[in-house]
Amino acid sequence: MADYDLIAVGGGIGGSALATVMGRAGYSVLVLEKSEVFEDQVRGEWIAPWGVTEVRRLGLYDLLMGVGGHHLTSHTTYDETLDPAVAEAKTLPLGIFAPDVPGPLCIGHPKHCQTLFDAAAQAGAETVRGVDVNAVSLGAAPSVTFTEAGVTRTARARLVVGADGRNSMVRDAAGVTLNADRPHHMFAGMLVEDVTGWDETRQAIGTEDDFAFLAFPQGDGKVRVYGSYGLGDRARFSGPDGARRFLEGFRVNCSPANRHIADGRPAGPLRSYANNDTCTDTPFAPGAVLIGDAAGWNDPIIGLGLSITYRDVRLLSDLLNGADDWSPELLAPYAEERRERMRRLRFVASIQSSLDAEFGDDARRRRRSYFERSASDPSLGLHAFAVMGGPESAPREIFTPAHRARVLGAETVPTT
Ligand SMILES: Cc1cc2nc3c(=O)[nH]c(=O)nc-3n(C[C@H](O)[C@H](O)[C@H](O)COP(=O)(O)OP(=O)(O)OC[C@H]3O[C@@H](n4cnc5c(N)ncnc54)[C@H](O)[C@@H]3O)c2cc1C
């Protein structure tokens, strides 16, 4: 007899959301979380409209709204090849992508994790934090050995869930390896506070010179900002005044309102990543299943890791709920859906990276040409629809080299 139905290694977004849903359904769940406190790691704080639909389907929407979830309702794309007034005249409403969803949902990552972790406990899961997982044993009798407050214990379960993020131990124990593409650009992020004058319901992106910015207001004068720059420039914001220099990078001509961000105050760490995408065709093994980043992550340039994780949780809980036999065969439909979902999103992220995060004259000409052509042919932007509406919301032919060639024309090698 197992001690639990499920053991989730990792009590972040995926582990705690799954534990909440399965706990509510009456299953016994143990959640093992390494951290003592959820801290700002510069991770996802923007849930796409299709991800909000997943949150709703899981019965978690009211919970997130109750702790300050903040909807964004419009989007502006700025660019050095566009007059700011022209860019703003094309501001896009974001309530058009998913039924009854006013737009993307923003919530601070530490608060998001803590809210779900608490909800899991309320749903009956046993939640333990500050643990060191010593060993994960899979196969017919899965178990996890862990140490908490100096006491070592082995717990057995019908299934171990790897919800332990990018460097997943469960993935290693399951013998699953990820295919990783080459990093495309550097991506740095930081939370900024005391931002006055920026419309708190409007997100924006833009590219100027050798820097591409993204801004997602969180409410209460806070804005989560990101910046993309060349791989060859990886130390660009290092050093004690790196955060200040990063904010100064937002002072661009193409988006005059960015001065409000540049005038704000750093409210958390500045972290940078070399952006890439990873994937596997088989996010499971006998005795284990992987969800969220542990199962492979999408390039953060399109900000979909949370939406992906919530869909993982929904698909997996739907399969497990009510099934007697949790063998790998049961999980095959999850793997199949995820494979195509991640293929499509990898494709979109790659186009978006080439458009927004390549710099120099050729890249500038390419963006200008894209803006001009898409004004008369909106189908050129259908890949971006997949970011907001979900990977299945754009027709199949969008995820092909032919569409990429239509968008980007003759490509150049990224600036490094
Ligand atoms: C710079 C950047 C920006 C991003 N922006 C966005 C965005 O705007 N929108 C979006 O949707 N996504 C975004 N993402 C992606 C998003 O943050 C992730 O996809 C998402 O957090 C994945 O959730 P998860 O539960 O799989 O992993 P995580 O959130 O990483 O949680 C994993 C948990 O497991 C715990 N853990 C790890 N190892 C162990 C262990 N051995 N034992 C016990 N516990 C363990 C960790 O402490 C953590 O709490 C961004 C990512 C990056 C890098």
Image: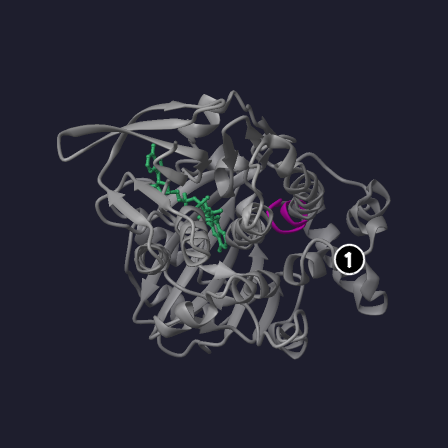
**In the image, residue 357 above or below residue 82:** above
**Secondary-structure class at tag 1:** loop
Q: What residue appears at the point 32 percent right and 47 percent down from the top-left corner? A: 242
Can you say which quadrant of the picture contains the N terminus? Answer: top left
Q: Position of residue 33 (x, y in %)?
A: 30, 41
Q: Residue furthest front?
A: 1
Q: What amino acid is labelled 1 in the image?
A: Ala
Q: Which residue is mark 1?
A: 394
> Does 103 sit left or right of 81 as displayed?
left
Ligand 1 resides in the quarter of the picture at: top left
Camera-side residue: 342 or 118? 118
Q: Position of residue 375 (x, y in %)?
A: 80, 68
Camera-side residue: 324 or 345? 324
Q: What residue appears at the point 81 percent right and 66 percent down from the top-left corner? A: 378
Main secondary-structure element of the magenta-colored stretch: helix
Q: Which residues are magenta?
A: 352-359
Ligand 1 neighbours mark 1 (CB distance < 8 Å) = no
Crowdedness near tag 1: few (<14), some (14–19) or many (≥20) residues, C-alpha within 10 Å: some
> Does 250 sit left or right of 401 as displayed?
left
Q: Is residue 344 within the magenta segment? A: no
Q: Position of residue 36 (x, y in %)?
A: 21, 45
Q: Position of residue 11 (x, y in %)?
A: 35, 46
Q: Quadrant of residue 279?
A: top right
Q: Quadrant of residue 367?
A: bottom right
Q: What residue appears at the point 81 percent right and 58 percent down from the top-left corner? A: 380
